[in-house]
Image (spheres, rainbow, N blue to C red):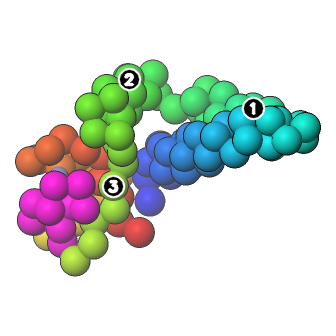
Amino acid sequence: MHPQLQLLVALQDTEGMLREVEEEGDKLEGMGFSNKGLEGLKKAQEEIVGKIDPRLAGRYRRLKGKFGHAVVPVVGNLCTGCFANIPSSFVSKTNEGKVQECESCGRILYWP
Ligand SMILES: [Zn+2]
């Protein structure tokens, strides 16, 4: 996988966890517990963002604002964001070093 793409997937995972921890944290704090996981996750998020190409990070933010999920896996030649068919030429050698996006919805694609 493209290293930048790997970072984007990691960022999306981290942000998903952050959201959960924030939601859970509110409940825990309400019960008198502290929310320790939050700080570590925020740090990880910052570190990942720092390594991503700013243009790519911008694209990620726009997609995330629009769809909720910016990076989606391709399963069975389908974009799991919009279920458009992803031509197999996308996975050819010439495209290996690029960050691919779905031609139909524009989401960033990865092959898990
Ligand atoms: Zn799509």
Tell me the tag on residue 72.
3
Residue that lies at the very extreme toward the bottom in this rendered image? 76
Q: Amino acid at mark 1?
A: Lys
Which of the pair 47/24 is nearer the observer? 24
Residue 105 higher or lower than 45, as above or below:
below
Residue 84 painted magenta: yes
Q: CA distance from mark 2 to mark 3?
A: 17 Å
Q: Is residue 54 left or right of residue 108?
A: right
Question: Counting other residues with Cα less than 10 Å from the Cα at mark 2, is it few (<14), some (14-19), or many (20 or more)?
Answer: few
Residue at the disc numbered 1: 43
Which of the pair 5/61 is nearer the observer? 61
Q: Amino acid at mark 3?
A: Val
* Residue behind label 3 places its C-beta within 8 angstroms of ligand 1: yes
Q: CA distance from mark 2 to mark 1?
A: 19 Å
Residue 35, image x, y percentages: 83, 38
Query: Which residue is found at the position 14% from the left and 62% from the top?
Result: 83
Q: Quadrant of residue 24?
A: top right
Query: Which residue is found at the position 61% from the left and 26% from the top?
Result: 50
Q: Amino acid at mark 2?
A: Gly
Query: Which residue is found at the position 52% from the left and 32% from the top?
Result: 52
Residue 102 higher or lower than 93, as above or below:
above
Residue at the disc numbered 2: 58
Kindly check if marks 2 and 1 are in contact, taking CB atoms under 8 A apart as contact: no
Query: Which residue is found at the position 54% from the left and 46% from the top?
Result: 16
